Image (tube, helix red, strand yellow):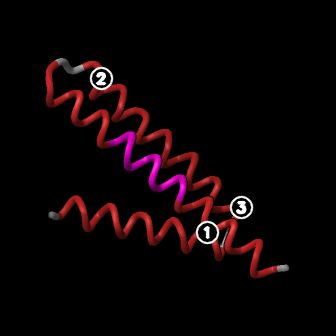
Amino acid sequence: MTLVIVIVVLVVVVFAAGVVAPRRSRRMQAVRDRMLRRGEREGDEHGGMLGDAAESALEMIRHVADRSAEAGRQTRRKLQD
C-alpha cells in the first residue's frame, strides 16, 4: 500500500515539474531513470521470481514516470500556445 502512495506522489511531482520547469524536469528524469535502471539491473542479477518481480516493477515505475513527465511538458506547450 505504501509503495502505491509513493508511486502516485512521484507521478504527480514529475507531472508538476514538467509543467512548471520543463528543462529541469528533463534533468530530473535523467537522474531518476539512471537510479531506476540501476535497480532494474540489480533485480536482473538476482535470480528467482523476486528478482524478476523487482525488475519488472521498477521498469513499470520508470515508464509511468516518464510518461507523466512528458504529459507535463506537453501541457506546458499547450498552455503557452
Q: Main secondary structure of the magenta part?
A: helix
Of callouts 3 and 1, the N-terminal one: 3
What residue sits 26% from the left and 68% below the top?
5
Does 34 appear above or below 22? Answer: above
Amino acid marked by disc 2: Asp
Q: Would you say 16 lies left or right of 78 here?
A: left
Of callouts 2 and 3, the N-terminal one: 3
- Mark 1 and mark 2 residues within 8 Å of each other at the beta carbon: no
Q: Would you say 73 lies left or right of 78 here?
A: left
Front disc: 3 or 1 = 1
What residue sits 62% from the left and 59% below the top?
70
- Mark 2 and mark 3 residues within 8 Å of each other at the beta carbon: no
Q: Does the segment drawn in magenta span residue 21? A: no
* Mark 2 secondary-structure assignment: helix
What residue sits 71% from the left and 74% below the top?
76
Looking at the picture, how far across and down is residue 74, in whole percent?
A: 69, 67
Residue at numbered disc 2: 44
Residue at numbered disc 1: 72
What residue sits 35% from the left and 32% below the top?
40
Q: Quadrant of residue 4?
A: bottom left
Span colored in magenta: 58-67
Amino acid marked by disc 1: Gly
Amino acid marked by disc 3: Arg
- CA distance for labels 2 and 3: 31 Å
Q: Quadrant of residue 25?
A: bottom right
Does 23 appear above or below 77? Answer: above
As drawn, which residue projects farthest toward the right? Answer: 81
Looking at the picture, how far across and down is residue 18, in whole percent?
A: 62, 67
Residue at numbered disc 3: 23
Q: Quadrant of residue 15?
A: bottom right
